[in-house]
Each structure stands twice: as structure tokens, then as C-alpha cells.
Amino acid sequence: MSNIQLSISLPQLGLDDEQLQAEVENLLPQIREVDGVENAALVDVSEAPPGSKSVTGYVLGMLKTSIESGHLKTVFDFLRDRFGNKPIKLVLKASDGRELNLEVSSKEELEFARQQAEEFLKNTKTV
């Protein structure tokens, strides 16, 4: 079983930069406690996606995790319970380098995104 990378962005929570970064920093220890999360960290500015803002050396409103692939549902359940009907962006990176970009703004969309992510991972070639 391989690990997958999951980046989580909180794009439009109606918060200013400082509040948004506080929200991400608050999320970090919570997601580290989720079963299957091997590590979680703020995204360093050197890894910033094009067009993103940074604050104090980190990408604003974004964190990355490494998850055991068998625990994807657990992580998505945590996100559903934590964010409910708030918009979040997810980028799932499989071990073969392929990426799946997901944007959700409801519990139903997050459940559908989880199904898409699981299907995406079924087609991952082991490297």
C-alpha cells in the first residue's frame, strides 16, 4: 500500500489573510490526529502553486498531507465533519505522479469527490 499526497486549500472562507492562516494553523494539529495521516505540514513558499499568496514563508490557506492510501475515506470524513458546506480545494497526487484536482463546497460534493479520488487511485500504477 502506497502513500498519497493530499493538498488542502481553504480558498473562500470570507477571512482576511491573517484569519485564514490562523484557520489553517488550527487545522494542522487536528488533521495530524486523523488515522492514516502520516504527516501534515504547511506548504512552503518554495512549493507554491502559481498565483498563490504567501505569508511568513508559507502558502496562505494551504497545507499538505501524506496519507496511507487505505485511509482516504477517514480523511475525507474528517474534512466533511470539519468543513461541512464550506468551500475547499483538494489536490490528490498519486504515487505515479498523476494529480486529481477537486473543488467542493458541500458535504454531498465532498462525498462524491471521495468516490472520484478512490476511483482515481484504483488506476494508479505502482512505481
Image (tube, grey):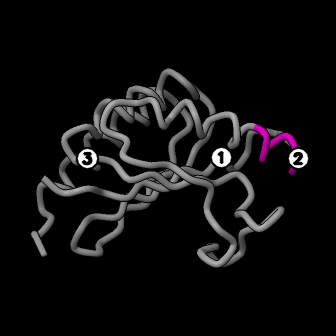
Image quarter hosting the C terminus: bottom left
SS for dot 2? helix
Q: What number is the disc on residue 112?
A: none
Q: Calculate the distance from the C-alpha at mark 1 to the C-alpha at mark 2.
A: 13 Å
Q: For residue 10, which numbered disc appears in the image? A: 1
How far apart in space, not on screen, are marks 3 and 1 (Cα)? 22 Å
For the residue carrying disc 2, how many other residues have a C-alpha within 10 Å: few (<14), some (14-19), or many (20+)? few
Q: Is residue 19 magenta?
A: yes
Asked if residue 106 lies left or right of residue 50, the reply is left
Residue situated in front as seen by the camera: 111 or 27: 27
Figure quadrant of residue 29: top right
- Helix, strand or loop status at disc 3: strand
Q: Which residue in the protein does label 3 denote?
A: 68
> Going from the N terminus, do you reach mark 1 or mark 2 first?
1
Which secondary structure class fits the magenta region best? helix
How far, Cα to Cα, is label 2 from label 3? 31 Å
Left/right placement of residue 63 relative to residue 92 reads right
Magenta residues span 16-22
Question: What residue is disc 2 on?
Answer: 18
Give the class, few, some or many, for how many residues have Cα within 10 Å of label 3's Cα (few <14, many ≥20): some
* Count of labels in the image: 3
